[in-house]
Image (cartoon, coloured by chain):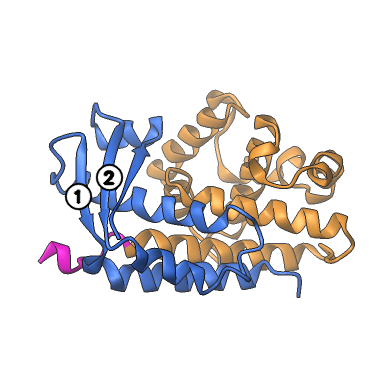
Chain colours: A orange, B blue
Amino acid sequence: MSENEKSALKRVLERYGLKSVKSVKTVEEVVKDADLIDITKIDDDLVDEVGRVTDFDNLSKTTQKRIILLGMTIKMAEEGKNGLTLEEVIEATNEFYVELLLEYLVRMKILERRGKWSWRTRKQCEYRLSEGGKRVLKLMKIFEEPGKEGG
Amino acid sequence: MDVIVDVILRKETVEQLKTKRKQFKLLVKNAELLASELEKYKELFVVKYRARDLAEIFLTNLVVEKIKKGEVDGEVIEIDLKDYEDKINKFVGIVVEMENLFSES
């Protein structure tokens, strides 16, 4: 992990208050943390709450943070493969679109609760997150491109 | 159709942009260009506030880009969406992709 990635990871962890900065040395340590990476466990914690809500805003802040970390951790695990890089994920968390992506995650949970969709495998979840994340980045880049207004 | 929209930047965004002002009045000219594009997909946007939410995201990002370029010097910002038709189409297109990605099927 590069120094940039280390400091970026620390910033994010600080922002969401999930781990002390000093205790995290590598991405791998975060990935290994069962609380953050074990989808089944997070499902158990979330399912009742998500089942009651109709939109993301109604989730508790703690739950929102956990979902954020779930998505981010999966991306971290995929780093260097087909997923987003850590830097890209962190960049996305600084922008508005991360909520868009998170809302889709919650929607999946609601559909699951209603028996209309199943997480089935971790791969399926990862695929949607990964593809969703890529589109989030595409959205971000739209505004960076010069348009008519820019001459 | 011209509309006036209040844009409030998040704390993190204000810090990133190193700007002191966090609230702006946005005069949006030809607002129907964005509204009509979102309206096309209203059946797809199953969440009731989705279209409004997306419009807010789009407009807020235009403001952020203008701030980054140093084009904002007061509380009121004027934007003509005729200049952003290409961005509107791309934006809505990608959102539609995402809606489909996370749909039931």
Q: Position of residue B17 (x, y in %)?
A: 26, 37
Given the current orientation, which residue lies at the most extreme front position?
B1
Q: Are marks 1 and 2 in contact (CB under 8 Å)?
A: yes
Amino acid at dot 2: Leu
Q: Residue furthest left?
A: A151
Query: Quick one: label 1 or label 2, which is nearer the N terminus?
Result: 2
Point 65% across, 57% down: residue: B47
A43 with respect to A143 (left or right): right
The subunit letter for the residue under badge 1 reads B
Q: Secondary structure at mark 1?
A: strand
Q: Is A147 colored magenta in this rendering?
A: yes
Q: Circle 2: is it few (<14), some (14-19), or many (20+) Cα within 10 Å?
A: some
User: Residue A27: x, y in percent?
Assistant: 57, 44
At a point 12% along the width and 37% down the height, the residue shown is B73
What number is the disc on residue B78?
Answer: 1
Q: Report the magenta residues as a range.
A: A143-151
Quick one: which residue is furthest to the right in this view? A115
> In the image, is residue A72 above or below residue A16?
below
Identify the residue shown where x is 38% and y is 65%: B34
Q: Quadrant of residue A64?
A: top right
Q: Amino acid at mark 1?
A: Glu
Q: Is residue A18 above or below residue B43?
A: above
For the point 39% across and 72% down, the residue is B90
Name the image quarter holding residue B42. bottom right
Name the magenta segment's main secondary structure: loop
Which residue is the site of mark 2?
Answer: B26
- Disc ID at residue B45: none
The quadrant in which the C terminus of chain A is found is: bottom left
Relative depth, front residue between B30 and B104 = B30
Query: Within the magenta stretch, is there residue B96?
Result: no
